[in-house]
Image (cartoon, helix red, strand yellow):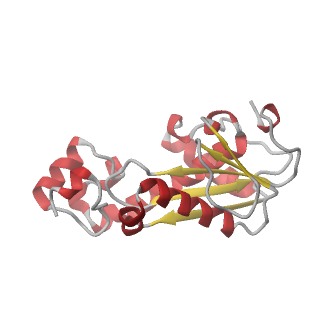
Amino acid sequence: MNIDDINIPNLANIAGVDEAGRGPLAGPVITAAVILPSEYCLPNLGDSKKLSGSQRAKLYTEITDQAVAWAVGRAEPDEIDELNILWATMLAMKRAVESLNVAPSHVLVDGNRCPDIDVSSQAVIKGDTFVDCISAASIIAKQSRDREMLEFDQEFPEYGFASHKGYPTKKHLAALADHGICRIHRKSYKPVKIYL
């Protein structure tokens, strides 16, 4: 399914927006906004969570090469702790849209809520599975966050961020028990709070 299959304005420069990293115990939440051209070639485009790492890496390059515009937004762990993950995600989405170097005519957001932005917007539940510009944003956000968590793994090797990307796996919870928290942990999340 493509953008033409849902009830949205018939406009050029429609941006898709999605996030990566709402569930992890550590690291930022990363969002992306992507405007695709009217014609593009992106085989295997789909929900980033259903793609392999190599497929995402290839599509990341193809999307960034072909997009009319793309941008990444973020909210840091301290912002997540202050605002909660929902509002931090909305803030990161707003930052992504506002960082586009081409102004979008309309914004399609994966999920059931839109950020507070100065352009018409529409929430699309499961949009990352059938709206191409949202799928593209999903891939950019996920790939960007995964790369950052690999960098954090170099800084904090005892936590194993390279393998779990901050999600609450057994390995990560065991590392918290052994080492306590580091500066990128989300202190408001229950599994982290007990080690403060």
In the figure, is residue 133 to the left or right of 51? Answer: right
Horizontal and vertical percent position of residue 12: 87, 52
Quadrant of the image containing the N terminus: top right
Horizontal and vertical percent position of residue 82: 38, 66
Q: In the depicted view, which residue is nearer to us: 94 or 176?
A: 94
In the figure, is residue 84 to the left or right of 13? Answer: left
Horizontal and vertical percent position of residue 74: 51, 64
Horizontal and vertical percent position of residue 115: 61, 57
Q: In the depicted view, which residue is nearer to us: 9 or 152?
A: 9
Q: Is residue 111 above or below residue 15?
A: above
Question: At 70% across and 55% down in the image, what residue appears?
Answer: 34
Q: Is residue 111 above or below residue 143?
A: above
Q: Residue 3's quadrant in the figure?
A: top right
Q: Residue furthest left?
A: 178
Q: Give the number of callouts.
A: 0
Quadrant of the image containing the C terminus: bottom left
In the figure, is residue 88 to the left or right of 131? Answer: left
Q: Residue 70's quadrant in the figure?
A: bottom right
Question: At 54% across and 63% down in the image, what residue appears?
Answer: 91
Question: At 64% across and 42% down in the image, what residue appears?
Answer: 135
